[in-house]
Image (tube, rainbow, N blue to C red):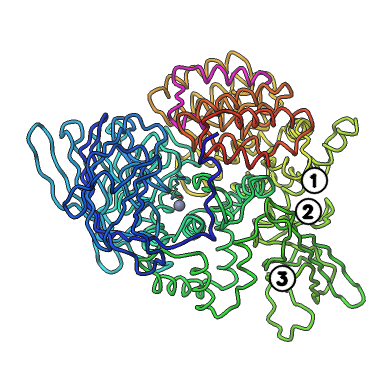
Amino acid sequence: MQENSCQVVRLEDYAPSEFLVEKVHLTFELAERDTVVKTLMSLRRNPRSTNREQTLFLDGIDLKLRSLHIDGTPVADRDYRLDESGLYLFGVPDVFELQTEVIIQPQDNTVLEGLYCSGGMFCTQCEAEGFRRITFFPDRPDVMATYTTSIVADKKRYPVLLSNGNLLSSEDLPDGLHRVTWHDPFPKPSYLFALVAGDIVFEEGAFVTASGRSVALRVYLQRHNLGRGTHALEALKKAMLWDEKVFGLEYDLDLYMIVAVDDFNMGAMENKGLNIFNSKYVLADRETATDLDFQAIEEVVAHEYFHNWTGNRVTCRDWFQLSLKEGLTVFRDQQFSADEVARSLKRIHDVRLLRTVQFAEDSGPLAHPVRPEAYQEINNFYTATVYEKGAEIVRMLHNLLGKEMFRRGLELYFSRFDGTAVTIEDFVKAMEDAAQVDLSQFRLWYSQAGTPNIRATGNYDESSKEFCLRLQQGCAPTPGQSDKQPLHIPVAIGLLNSTGTEMPVCEVGHSGTDCDTTAILPLKKTEQVFRFKVSERPVPSLLRGFSAPVRLTYNYSDAELMFLTVHDSDPFNRWDAAQQLVTQVIMRGVDRMADGQAFMVEPVLIDAFRQVLHSSSKDRGLAAQMLMLPSENYLVDQRLRIDIDGICTVRRKLREALSDALHDEWASVRQACIKDTSAGYGFSPEEVGCRSLKNVCLSYLAAQSKAGFWPQVRQWLDEADNMTDRLALLTLLAEVENAESQTAFAQFYQRAKDIPLVLDKWFAVQSGARHPLIVDKIRRLLAHEDFNLCNPNRVRAVLHTFARGNLGGFHAPSGAGYHLVGDYVMKLDRLNPQVSASLAGSFSAWRRFDNDRSALMKEQLNKMFSTEGISRDLREIVQRSLQ
Ligand code: ARG
Ligand code: ZN
């Protein structure tokens, strides 16, 4: 076992850095084999550090030290020491200049942190701790310095040399080299440093800020992708305008650059002035990207742009505060997208993600608070909890304070902390001070892990005409936190009368007559009762708009859910009522199957679906969402004990039954959608909604394919003029074994083989297919000449899609799926620990499965754990999973 395998970093141990860096000048002499990095930095003792030691430690990993000077004098051998984590300098003065020269090997860098090569160019990824792979440095976010960066490279091969900030100079040098120098005037932590070099081109745009600064916008891409950056560029302009309008926040440099790279561990990175993106979140045109891709690009572009204030101008004191920038920035990009597209669809989309991914995380061994208290490897904490639950907390604050107060709170936050590195507590305090509210109980959302459960029960008293709503909250223990306290949970509710009209929500004792039709109940205790004056027995609409990230249960009858599906004025809750109804029906089916009874469809569901279909033309996008069955991932999370066979089987049979019972409706609604989009291809919410409803109908038609259906599908595929439709058709073909399917995949491959992002889809569609021989299929895909273990997108397309999205296949009773994925976790770990650790997470729920599966999953985890030399990333995930 590695010596440092159990090193835990703790929030309570935080201490300010002993030394601060004011200025850094970096010079890169770029070469694939040996890149030389010369660093000149001015250091001084931190007046706020209590430690008076004369030893300075600088982080550094995989750096070959060539020279070391303090104030121009070489450092003697006895005055420094190197180990695998960095450099110790003994007896340093209080103020001095340090000059280092190191050699790094970008072409061997498969972890994709620090400086690496991707598709013939150089790029960097420094968050969270990648800068230490570039040079010796106090690589922590509370050390903020101004950076000047010179890059020297072969001019022919690397004509474009980029770094943060503004271009200072560029000149030609002998031997075909050139040198470019950049300067970023804003002090920043090392994780925001960036460098790019390559033979790349850009698409350009311009933006003039509210105060009149003209900003050049550039999206850099490989030459063959020219034209595919336009959507990202437009999204950037929209985001810039939105942030000025909504929060009064302007951009602060003259240049904003986005660079698309093919090999990237995450989605994108907000480096100051020079964002580096996974090309998946930049490149798009109608031929290569789906409607969802277009939307995701808009979200990610906006997200990284918004970081310029929430993340860069005000950054994190330490990595425990990660949600300070991520939760807040996700909230901001969600608000932006909601303003751009249909608001309720955006909310449905976000809540789906939260419920499937974050809730699962929060109820398993990897559960952690939004502000974690300890970690071994920080890369393991870029989680749905830190991001998505973090955003939900900010959303609750926004609702509690109101739009105006929230904006004022943010203003106070920036006026207090601009240019500094702060904590989540600093943020909450600013909100509290601005709005003059007491958030002491609310703060628990950041420190307490686990999804709260709310049990709601309603009681109507005919004689007093009072509706009494009892809310009880609780939360199951999570690792390291057995005792949970009640949280402050805002529960938004409405009350519908028997005709489906909203009644004012008036608490008994409320004096005025100004009751709203939606009220936000402040649930703060373990149990609270709220009483309302109503004119008749109401159907309550609970947790409207998903006002808090909780699981709420209420004893609704099928009829009440049907009623809400049709009448609720909150579209989110209409969708949610439909989901609850289907989920209820499926779970009853699973129970019956476990009892040995045969499958049957409950007529109530057919009625509900028929109604949605009949009125679908009113809002097709919403109808499409209501008609999609809850995902297997969502269903398995409904019970502590996972009956995987029951869920997969009942869900499939239900789909077939709905297909059959409503065959004519699926066909006619599909036709209606086609008729209304025949004018051409556009991106309005209506057109996007039309495409999604059309394809949902199609998926039901495929479930009971009638004779002649597949040749039809082939023909539609030939006629399709956009990727959304093409991919929907291909997804259906992936689940059958016939001539049409074979030719379709062969043809798609021909079109895709030179476009990596499209080829990813070709892989992913097959990996996600419900298919009896799926494990063999996956093996073939992994052996395909275009499969590449070094490219995270490709790995995710095959392995993550399978392990996380194809539950029937991954959990095949033989354990073959586990075996395959377990082997690949180990293979990947030698190349890229971030990717292997995230894949290993698919075993974490092992305890919730039946005994056989549970044992097989555990065996894989044990195998990983007992392997020598596994990464710290993987070790932590495995260890916590087994604990
Ligand atoms: N800050 C980036 C974003 O969310 C993500 C960077 C993640 N990097 C990592 N090594 N986990 O916009
Ligand atoms: Zn972010």
Give the residue displayed 55% in from the left and 68% down from the top: 398
Disc 2 marks a residue whose amino acid type is: Leu
Q: What residue span does the magenta drawing correspond to?
A: 772-797
* Circles 2 and 1: CB atoms closer than 8 Å: yes
Q: Which residue is mark 1?
A: 584
Q: Nearer the viewer, mark 2 or mark 1?
A: 1
Q: Quadrant of the N terminus?
A: top right
**Few, some or many residues within 10 Å of mark 1 (<14, 14–19, 20+):** some
- In the image, is 504 to the left or to the right of 383? right
The verdict on residue 31 being magenta is no
Q: Mark 3 or mark 2: name the one nearer the start of the chain.
A: 3
Where is residue 625, by image quadrant? top right
- In the image, is 411 to the left or to the right of 174? right
Q: Which residue is mark 3?
A: 524
Where is residue 545, by image quadrant? bottom right
Disc 3 marks a residue whose amino acid type is: Lys
Q: Which residue is mark 2?
A: 561
